[in-house]
Amino acid sequence: MQHNKIKDSVICVTGGAGFIGSYVVEELIPLQPKKIVIIDNFIRGTRENMKSFINNPIVEFYEADIRDSIKLEHCIAGSDYVFHMAALRINACAASPRDGFDVMLKSTFEVAELCRKHSVKKVIYSSSASVYGLAQHFPTPETDNPYNNQTFYGAAKMWGEQLFRSYKFMYGLDYVALRYFNAYGPRMDTDGKYTEVMIKWLDCIRDSRNPLIYGDGSTTMDFVYVKDIAKANIAALQADVTDEAFNIGNCEETSLKGLLDVLLKVNDSNLTPEYRDETSYNPVSKRLADISKAKEMLGFAPTVSLEEGMKELTDWYFSKVSAPAAS
Ligand SMILES: NC(=O)c1ccc[n+]([C@@H]2O[C@H](COP(=O)([O-])OP(=O)(O)OC[C@H]3O[C@@H](n4cnc5c(N)ncnc54)[C@H](O)[C@@H]3O)[C@@H](O)[C@H]2O)c1
């Protein structure tokens, strides 16, 4: 049995009120940490996401911005481990690169500095499959290079990985970077400008409107259920592994059209998609993770199939909004 490093430890989670962060906190609690310190400015996260643990006496929540280095230091000082998950989304970085710079680069630098200063034992850094852009190989191994990435977000994530790598080399700060593929599940963002397509399709199913597909629906992604991502985070902390990056995906390639088929199936819906011309150019037409490294070194294995996950997402979403109209 592996030693439980989390037991009696103090753990800081930046972005712990967010979609993935809140599940990481839920995975941590049964492992009996002494304290979990969360810093989140609610730009995307919510109190609702934290409702299962916000009143737990071991949880200390700070509604604060990681750009506030004094608050950040307050959270990191005294922590044994840090999950650095606070970030802006890819579209938000594109809409405001300066904010992207401040949050993704400057504050990540501050996190690394503070972890070094306060002798944090290990950082688990949320990276992204975006570092690859359109990858060279499928399934994509971690050794694919990042030169095809064209986004500020992907560049920032790669920089973050390299930053922690340099801090390992210069100061011995242990870290693991996790490159999540396409995360989904309950608590994903459901409104606002950047709502994911599956939520838009669920709205169509609820309202008995034919769902729209922009383009021919052949773009593929590798969808990974949020709880599996949270488990990968725990495994990355517990494993005696450092200075490594891991793909975290399902190792299953799903086209947009295939995704819609699954969503229609789990909802017993016979709506048919309507196709529209692509409104924006997406340079990443294909995603498929090679997760053999995470399997071997972290013991990571996804446990939730796309169908099961879409069912969970549907149940959660329809209980959040009004019930689906009878078809
Ligand atoms: N969701 C995905 O598909 C996906 C894929 C790859 C990587 N990631 C990465 O995983 C991590 C978690 O993503 P998520 O999907 O849970 O997104 P999310 O937006 O739900 O979570 C990020 C959290 O960080 C908080 N935050 C943002 N800026 C902050 C700031 N300046 N100060 C304090 N808090 C701030 C937000 O309020 C939010 O709660 C992020 O680093 C993200 O880049 C996500």
Image: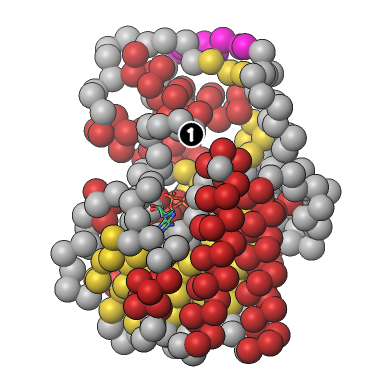
Asked if residue 316 is positioned above or below residue 5 in the image, the reply reads above
**Image location (x, y in percent) of residue 255:** 64, 31
On screen, residue 325 versus residue 93, left or right, reads left
- Judged from the image, the secondary structure of the residue bearing numbered disc 1 is loop
Asked if residue 214 is positioned above or below residue 237 in the image, the reply reads above
Residue 218 in which image quadrant = top right
Task: Work out which quarter of the rendered image holds the N terminus and state it.
Answer: bottom left
Task: Work out which quarter of the rendered image holds the C terminus and state it.
Answer: top left
Q: Report if residue 135 lies within the magenta region.
A: no
**Image location (x, y in percent) of residue 202:** 40, 25
Asked if residue 76 is positioned above or below residue 143 in the image, the reply reads below
Q: Report if the beta carbon of the residue with label 1 is closer than 8 angstroms to ligand 1.
A: no
**Image location (x, y in percent) of residue 283:** 74, 35
Q: Report if residue 272 lies within the magenta region.
A: yes
> What's the amino acid at mark 1?
Tyr
Q: Residue at x 59, y 85 (%)?
A: 173
Q: Residue at x 81, y 52 (%)?
A: 147
Q: Which residue is mark 1?
A: 194
- Magenta stretch bounds: 270-276
Quick one: label 1, few (<14), some, or many (20+) residues within 10 Å?
few
On the question of residue 233 being in view, the answer is no
User: Which of the two residues, 294 or 40, is positioned nearer the viewer here?
Assistant: 40
**Image location (x, y in percent) of residue 100:** 56, 51
Asked if residue 109 is positioned above or below residue 288 in the image, the reply reads below
